[in-house]
């Protein structure tokens, strides 16, 4: 029978998610204090046995304090909060305001150039994508319509040709 775990090994990046994980560890500490063995704790809290045993070892050495969150992993972002606020405003103005007049699409490469010009810090496209995602932006595919589009020809095609194509 597969074991269902509360969370995977790789997630939990937000402060709220870290707080939830920390609360689960604190619940485990309460159970350890009641002499509940780690495999039972794992089952009750729906976490892996490996996690329960690791928490038990930490709890034995340092008590509940040793189960506190260590904070976010990795290096802090070089993209400062004030820069993010500026970037959000710049993105709202559109690419034409910053010299890209051929179309009105922001690409990660363009955003990276914009940030580099303004703050003299270079980010890769992947880093820019991650920053934009954290700021609440998502990938948007624009609707492409030809400038020379003939609406009457399109309507005629939809009315006369499409029904024959659809029947096949």
Image (cartoon, rainbow, N blue to C red):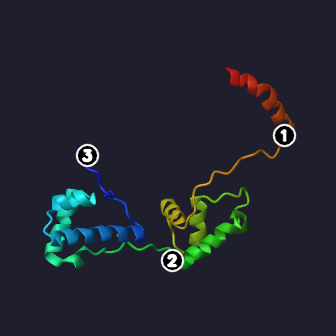
Mark toward the start of the polypeptide (3 vs 2):
3
SS assignment at label 3: loop
> Which of the pair 91/12 is nearer the observer?
12
Seen as rendered, the residue at the extreme right is 152
**x%, y% of residue 159?**
81, 29
Question: 1 above or below 62?
Answer: above
Are there few (<14), some (14-19), or many (20+) residues within 10 Å of tag 1?
few
State the quadrant of the N terminus: top left
CA distance separating discs 1 and 2 = 48 Å
Q: Is residue 141 visible?
A: yes
Question: 156 above or below 4?
Answer: above
Q: Which residue is mark 1?
A: 151
Are there few (<14), some (14-19), or many (20+) residues within 10 Å of tag 3?
few
SS assignment at label 2: loop
Seen as rendered, the residue at the extreme top is 168
Q: Is residue 74 visible?
A: no
**x%, y% of residue 140?**
62, 54
State the quadrant of the C terminus: top right
Q: Which mark is residue 2?
A: 3
Name the quadrant containing residue 21.
Answer: bottom left
**x%, y% of residue 100?**
70, 62
> Which of the pair 84/57 is nearer the observer?
57
Q: Which residue is mark 2?
A: 80
Mark 1 or mark 3, which is nearer to you?
Answer: 3
Question: 123 above or below 2?
Answer: below
Q: Which mark is residue 13?
A: none
């Amino acid at each position: 029978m597969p074991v269902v775990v509360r969370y995977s090994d790789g997630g939990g990046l937000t402060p709220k998610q870290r707080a939830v994980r920390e609360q689960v560890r604190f619940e485990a500490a309460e159970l350890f204090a009641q002499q509940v063995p780690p495999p039972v704790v794992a089952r009750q809290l729906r976490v892996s046995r490996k996690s329960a045993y690791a928490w038990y070892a930490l709890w034995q050495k340092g008590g509940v304090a040793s189960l506190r969150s260590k904070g976010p992993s990795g290096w802090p972002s070089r993209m400062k909060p004030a820069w993010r606020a500026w970037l959000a405003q710049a993105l709202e103005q559109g690419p034409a305001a910053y010299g890209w007049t051929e179309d009105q699409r922001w690409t990660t490469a363009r955003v990276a150039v914009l940030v580099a010009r303004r703050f003299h810090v270079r980010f890769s496209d992947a880093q820019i994508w991650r920053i934009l995602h954290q700021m609440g932006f998502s990938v948007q595919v624009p609707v492409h319509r030809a400038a020379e589009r003939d609406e009457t020809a399109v309507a005629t095609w939809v009315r006369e040709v499409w029904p024959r194509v659809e029947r096949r």
